[in-house]
């Protein structure tokens, strides 16, 4: 405990919470786990300069820079990159006025851009940051169509600019829910999807929207997909009646492969149907989501080179499309060569629980006859691999030279339930770990009512 208090005091003096500028610092006296799938290194250091990692590995491998931060024998990892969250999109999920997760009455679907509604002051953002989450992909749920809309990559820094990349991907539902949204069956969902992609392809060609073959992208800002096609005015004629012009325009980057297409499918047969889409639309940049029965078709997924975002606790069939669900699913897919990230956090499945889920997969590997992950694989499944799937691999979710300094110092093994972050850095900036929950804890820690606010007077 003395070591932990010493480390916290040292850090508190070295880097003031809430600092607005990245500082050069070196974390010493730590077990370093880089998040690249390798095993942790005891007695390591992490060097950060200019908001970037310049070294992470055994002590003596690089000269310290900036302020020396003694981790007190704790652990240092990259920040958690949480795949498919609803962070920043609601305050109270049961209160519709504060909830932007779904729009069942909206005339639009694919055109919904969730980056416009991310609230960095949301309680869930602060709570997740205190749990070691530094980056995430955020999106709502499909409401009136199989298309949920366009998700964003965000950071959880204590500042007013959370969006790292808007419109990073399009999300759709197939399987049982997709069938229900499309009119009552899986064939209806597939017909709707194919019609929409063909309309988008035709519309993009006719209107010359950026991303179509007729006019190559003329504006590229580096991190972002090319200029939002909805901003391009067009007089192109359309002979369809299913998609609005807004939705059709939003799908042009999808059909051209410039925007990722996340598709939720659970049943093995549904997964095969998703993989078959590549034969009709070769440019699609697919990501499978859910994939409860993925282990049954793992070799086919690996051969297609399609990454997966899977629920690690999907261990029992809760619907007919999950009859073959097993907690061995993630481990078996990884062994087959599939790129798998642990993710899909919404409602009660908060992204701060990611280390616990990853730790469960490590424990599973130690049970005779079961298939889980190694420690290094498990950490990678919640750090570097989600970043890789999101198209920002090497930049986030890893402690490697050149990577953004999203660094978390833990008081123990981060995949153990009893461990917690003692410091979180995003872009090399020390972050506050207080939130609504910690303030409630502190207020009601004792029964002294003298410091309660006026509303508590009797």
Image (spheres, rainbow, N blue to C red):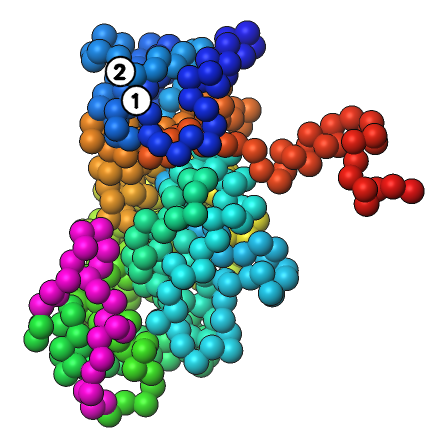
Residue 234 visible within the image: yes
Q: Is residue 130 left or right of residue 285?
A: right
The part of the image, by quadrant, that contains residue 403 is top left
- Labelled pair 1, 2 in contact (Cβ < 8 Å): yes
Where's residue 348, x and y in %? Answer: 57, 49
Q: Check the image and report above or below for 79 versus 147.
A: above
The part of the image, by quadrant, that contains residue 42 is top left
Of residues 181 and 175, the one drawn nearer to the viewer in this rendering: 181
Q: Check the image and report above or below for 268 versus 456.
A: below
Q: CA distance from mark 1 to mark 2?
A: 6 Å
Residue 291 visible within the image: no
Q: Residues within 10 Å of mark 2 (few under 14, many from 20)?
A: some
Span shown in magenta:
216-238
Assign the N terminus to one quadrant of the image: top right
Name which residue lies at 50% across and 67% down: 102
Q: Check the image and report above or below for 229 versus 325.
A: below
Please tell me whether residue 228 belongs to the stretch shown in magenta: yes
- Numbered mark located on residue 219 in the image: none
Q: Which residue is mark 2?
A: 65
Secondary structure under badge 1?
loop
Where's residue 290, x and y in %? Answer: 40, 54
Of residues 331 and 68, the one drawn nearer to the viewer in this rendering: 68
Name which residue lies at 26% across and 73% down: 231
Where's residue 448, x and y in %? Answer: 82, 27
Q: Which residue is mark 1?
A: 24
Q: Is residue 109 left or right of residue 215?
A: right
């Amino acid at each position: 405990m003395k070591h932990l208090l010493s480390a916290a005091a040292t850090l508190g003096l070295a880097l003031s919470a809430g600092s607005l500028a990245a500082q050069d610092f070196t974390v010493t006296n730590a077990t370093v786990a880089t998040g690249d799938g390798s095993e942790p290194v005891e007695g390591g250091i992490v060097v950060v300069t200019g908001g970037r990692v310049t070294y992470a590995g055994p002590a003596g491998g690089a000269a310290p820079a900036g302020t020396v931060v003694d981790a007190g024998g704790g652990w240092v990892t990259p920040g958690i990159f949480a795949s498919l969250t609803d962070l920043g999109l609601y305050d109270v999920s049961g209160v519709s006025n504060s909830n932007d997760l779904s729009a069942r009455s909206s005339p639009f679907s694919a055109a919904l851009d969730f980056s416009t509604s991310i609230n960095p002051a949301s309680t869930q953002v602060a709570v997740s940051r205190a749990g070691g989450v530094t980056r995430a992909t955020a999106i709502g749920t499909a409401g009136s169509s199989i298309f949920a809309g366009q998700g964003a990559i965000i950071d959880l820094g204590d500042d007013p600019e959370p969006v790292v990349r808007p419109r990073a991907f399009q999300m759709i539902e197939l399987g049982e829910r997709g069938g229900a949204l499309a009119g009552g069956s899986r064939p209806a969902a597939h017909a709707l999807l194919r019609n929409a992609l063909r309309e988008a392809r035709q519309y993009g060609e006719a209107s010359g929207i950026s991303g179509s073959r007729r006019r190559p992208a003329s504006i590229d800002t580096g991190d972002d997909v090319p200029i939002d096609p909805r901003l391009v005015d067009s007089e192109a004629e359309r002979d369809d009646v299913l998609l609005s012009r807004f939705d059709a325009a939003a799908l042009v980057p999808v059909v051209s492969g410039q925007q990722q297409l996340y598709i939720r499918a659970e049943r093995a047969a549904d997964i095969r149907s998703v993989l078959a889409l590549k034969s009709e639309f070769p440019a699609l940049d697919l990501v499978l989501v859910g994939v409860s029965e993925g282990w049954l078709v793992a070799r086919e997924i690996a051969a297609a080179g399609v990454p997966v975002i899977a629920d690690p606790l999907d261990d029992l069939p809760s619907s007919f499309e999950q009859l073959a669900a097993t907690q061995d699913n993630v481990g078996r897919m990884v062994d087959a060569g599939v790129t798998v990230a642990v993710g899909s956090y919404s409602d009660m499945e908060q992204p701060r629980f990611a280390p616990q889920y990853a730790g469960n997969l490590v424990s599973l590997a130690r049970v005779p006859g079961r298939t889980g992950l190694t420690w290094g694989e498990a950490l990678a499944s919640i750090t570097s691999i989600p970043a890789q799937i999101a198209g920002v691999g090497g930049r986030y979710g890893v402690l490697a030279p050149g990577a953004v300094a999203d660094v978390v110092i833990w008081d123990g093994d981060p995949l153990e339930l009893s461990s917690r972050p003692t410091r979180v850095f995003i872009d090399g900036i020390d972050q506050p770990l207080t939130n609504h929950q910690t303030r409630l804890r502190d207020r009601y820690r004792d029964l002294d009512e003298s410091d309660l606010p006026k509303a508590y007077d009797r």
